[in-house]
Amino acid sequence: MTPRALLRALCCLAGAAALACQAQIPLAGVTEAKGPGTLAGTSFKNGYRMAIDEINGSGGVLGQKLALTQFDIDTKPDAAKEAMGQAVAGKPFAVLGPVFSGLTLASMPVTTTTGIPHFTGGEAASLTRKFHPTLMRSSLSQTASAPRLASFVAYGLEPKSLALMSIDNDFGRDGKAALAEVLKRRNVNVSFDRAIKPGQTDFSKDIADLIAAQPEALLFYTTETEAIGLLKELRKQGFNKPIFTDGLVAAQTVVDGAAGGAEGVFAHMIASVDAPTPQVQSFTARYITRYGARPDHNAIKGFFVVQLIKAGLELAGKVDQALFLKAVKDTRFDIRKYPELLSSTGYDFFGELNRESYFVVIREGRPRVLATVRSIEGGQVELPNRSQIAMNSAEFRRTVAAALPGAAPAVASVPPVSKAK
């Protein structure tokens, strides 16, 4: 035995000093900290940092601690690609981020041949269509979420004419295509179609044109930053028709930033901190204690991916990337056995995630759960009272009608989680 090996062996046998010699499982975070993606990137990072600390505090994974190297980036493709190169050079077990689909598209070629599990917060359908061997989603893709949102509009309201506004980037274009396909199948006529530019701040003409078109409802599909300005302008110009949107817009940061503009808006949320489950409510309380603010769906995404890494490694039985990917893609994770995943979860071969989602309405500055959705096409939903109903039923339409602005409150409200003292 060499002197160095002998010294290491003695060190690792030395009681309290053993922790200092403990092997670590390296993770790399690549998340937006500047530009339009700041809200999403910061929340995603908060979620996975919390999960890392909680796991390490309870003994780690397979006797090893998780170690994070963080790369904060601007919301630009070149910045994402450069940071991913730096992250991969450090040979992490897994990469967490970016959140935006366009940044993921720019950076994922860097991880294609590395064997490194690459967890994205992006939802654009095109991501997994690249057949990246190690790309894993942290939430539903548009392939799963857009049909649920479109069915929410078509079955819940049955509009004869609908306005559709979407952001003109990878996320928005993929989402619009998926939404339009289902709306057409549901016989909903899109009578007004408008693209919003990424980073756009002036929506006065767009909303004026929208109001002039006189649709029965609006469905808009943008990222968080644009949504705040859009909601403010909709209210400023007095738009009073039902509004449907994606869960990004129901994030608490958007609801607060819109200063009342989100009130009464319906959304399909791929993850909700207001989900009426003890696992989600416990997560929300712990997050508030740590950060002093309510989490959003991006925080759930970040928390989830690290908890999934733990669950997958324990199934694999060793720190091996190939064994981990096989274990995760071959397993349906039941929330009763894996409560920290916050929902029962499964992956397919291409890294597509399947899990429950939620229809909500914004009331008094908070998303309130109308129904839980468990199938892609949303054939059946579960109401807060646990009853199962069909989405194309009169009962579902009455549920939506009761939540329209001006209607008496008739939806379940999850009690607010108080900040721990």
Image: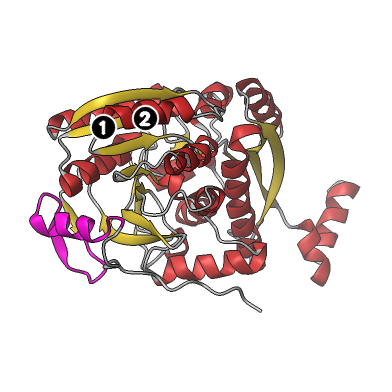
Q: Nearer the viewer, residue 257 or 408?
A: 408
Could you tell me residue 40's position as x and y percent?
Answer: 56, 43
Model colouring: secondary structure
What amino acid is at disc 2? Met
* CA neighbours of label 1 inside 10 A, class few (<14), some (14 to 19), many (20+): some
Q: Is residue 155 magenta?
A: no
Which mark, residue 372?
Answer: none
Range of the magenta residues? 382-405
Question: Observer-nearest residue: 417 or 307?
Answer: 417
Q: Quadrant of the C terminus?
A: bottom right
Horizontal side of residue 311 vs 46, given as left or right: left
Q: Which residue is mark 1?
A: 214
Residue 10 shown left or right of residue 59 in the figure: right
Q: Is 263 left or right of 293, judged from the image as shown?
A: left
Is 313 drawn above or below residue 13 in the view shown? above
Q: Residue at x 38, y 48 (%)?
A: 270
Q: Position of residue 226 (x, y in %)?
A: 51, 35
Place residue 362 in its image quadrant: bottom left
- In the figure, residue 276 lies in which quadrant? bottom left
Position in image of residue 55 (x %, y %): 60, 62
Instruction: Give the residue at x 52% y 41%.
Output: 228
- Element type at mark 2: strand
Q: Tag 2 or tag 1, which sits nearer the N-term?
A: 2
Residue 395 covered by magenta stretch: yes
Give the answer, above or below, for where 164 lies relative to 284: above
Q: Nearer the viewer, residue 161 or 181?
A: 161
* Disc 2 crowd, CA 10 A, few/some/many (<14, 14-19, 20+): many
For the residue pair 119 and 101, the one nearer the viewer reads as: 101
Secondary structure category for the residue under label 1? loop
List the residue tagged with mark 2. Answer: 165
Pinpoint residue 340: horizontal percent, then vertical percent: 47, 63
The type of residue carrying mark 1 is Gln
